[in-house]
Amino acid sequence: MSSDTTLEQSTWTIRQIWMLTVACCAVALVVAAMAALNTALPDLARDTGATQSQLTWIVDGYTLTLACLLLPAGALGDRYGRRELLMFGLLVFAAGSSIPVFADEPSWIIASRVISGVGAAFVMPATLSLLTAGFPPAQRARAVGVWSGVAGSGAIAGLVVSGLLLEKWSWHSIFVSLAVVSVLILVVSFTIVTSKDAEAAPLDLPGTALIAGSIGLFVLGMIEAPARGWLDPVVLALLIGGIAMTAVFSWVELRTRHPLLDVRLFANRAFGSGAASLTLQFLATFGLFFLIVQYLQLVLDYSPLQSALALMPIAVPVMALSVVAPLLIPRIGLRALTATGVAFLGTGIALLTRLDASSTYAEVCVPLVVAAIGLGLSTTPATAAIVSNAPDSKQGVASAVNDATREIGSAIGVALAGSILAAGYGNHVQPAVDLLPEPAKEPVSGSLAAALHVAEAAGPQGAQLAEFARESFIKGMDQGALTLAAIMWVSAIVLGFWAPGRQRD
């Protein structure tokens, strides 16, 4: 191959750079929206009278709807045009985000988040499939790397921006900003080219219903597990129902002429290990977020904005390594990058056990940076493995698989970390609970936040209770961190055997 041809294949055009910019802005928006409201929940509860259950659904209604509709939305993008579905999703997202500006009762806010989730489900796979269809194979990996870095850092950006907004305005400003940014991206989306499957097959309606139901049941079971308990009949019914419906979906797809998702793709080692790797990465990452944010706010007494800014060191290695990783894939191979990255991610989470009630911010940064290195090394190779091993005509569905694994992993990670933390904290704080008057026992045993509230109301006598509750929280956090780390270390070994090695010419 001549040097001129090589240079031509490695250089991006202005049109490609602009498409990448628009796609990254759109995926950053929908990922940021997942985390943005976490900082506003106390203000939201105070102003609207929302119950704890309603607050949970304000956060989870978005995630659940998004997870259910990703695959059908990706298939529709392949059929009717990826840019057109991106724009439709942005319009729906903007409409949903605007609702609380005019109606701010809890039920309307939940409806707003569900509608926004519908829009996000059309936006997210379209952003990646536009890139994989719009960039030739020689340039595709770098574009996917940039997209992966933005998608991996979007949640932190959402926390930081929402924290900054709340410093000056009410929680309504978060919804206003989401709606305004969505409209702006919608307008500039007219300037990018579209793509679609030239031989569009009929939409697989049975497959669409089955996959939406299976993911919805499973994610809902994960959401309910920390509150109800893993052996609760409702939780077991949801989880088993989701798994059973997935099995039925696979059976149906193998017998359908034009399946929504060709499940035989998972037999491809690169595609299957990439999907599994992404699920595990986001299981660990969102489990880490769940633990560290509470530690920063409740143990080290950071404000919501300070805790969001404290997570910023994660974004730098993730972005840098996501851009560099495409250069390493052909030289090192998917196996080495995936196994190393997942192992680093587990090690970073394990280092949380070195933190205590007097840790400095520098000590907090160490596990965050180590985990971020692992995430940066493994995210882009996994995404590239999925999109490069799917047919070009099915890039919307492949992108939706990439996004769905992230959502499922996130739900599992939060549920698992939350359950272990709650159990560990409850066991260690029990000696103090036994000495308390009856009205104080339930809140103190329930959470550190409630225990600190009780301790504050008790005056000087509550200082000892607050200290003991914080120590109990740290012990529970250590148990959760070690469990997540062990899962990642075992997964690194499995992926080391499963993922394909470096391909030789």
Image: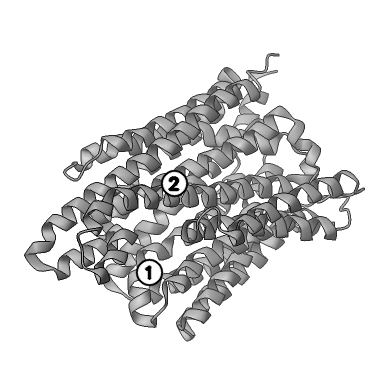
Give how far apart the Cα atoms at labels 2 and 1 are: 19 Å
Residue 194 rendering spot, x and y as whole percentages: 72, 54
Residues tagged 2 and 1 counted as in contact (Cβ below 8 A): no
Q: Nearer the viewer, residue 469 or 306?
A: 469
* Residue positioned 40% across, 76% down in the render: 172
Is residue 142 visible to us here? no
* Residue positioned 51% across, 69% down in the render: 57
125 up-or-down from 109: above or below? above
Taking the image as shown, residue 122 lies to the left or right of residue 390, namely left
Q: Residues within 10 Å of mark 2 (few under 14, many from 20)?
A: many
Q: Amino acid at mark 1?
A: Leu
Residue 49 rendering spot, x and y as whole percentages: 38, 81
- Tell me how many marks there are: 2
Q: Residues within 10 Å of mark 1 (few under 14, many from 20)?
A: some
- Which label is found at residue 41? 1
Q: Secondary structure beneath disc 1?
A: helix
* Residue positioned 62% across, 57% down in the render: 67
Residue 334 rendering spot, x and y as whole percentages: 60, 25
Question: Coloring scheme of the render?
Answer: one colour
Q: Nearer the viewer, residue 289 or 141?
A: 289
* Residue positioned 42% across, 65% down in the render: 37
Going from N to C along the chain, the mark reached first, 2 or 1, is 1
Q: Secondary structure beneath disc 2?
A: helix
The residue tagged 2 is 287
Q: Nearer the viewer, residue 33 or 392?
A: 33
Considering every residue shown, the one lying at the far left of the view is 460
For the N terminus, give its image quadrant. top right
Residue 439 occupies quadrant: bottom left
Q: Amino acid at mark 2?
A: Gly
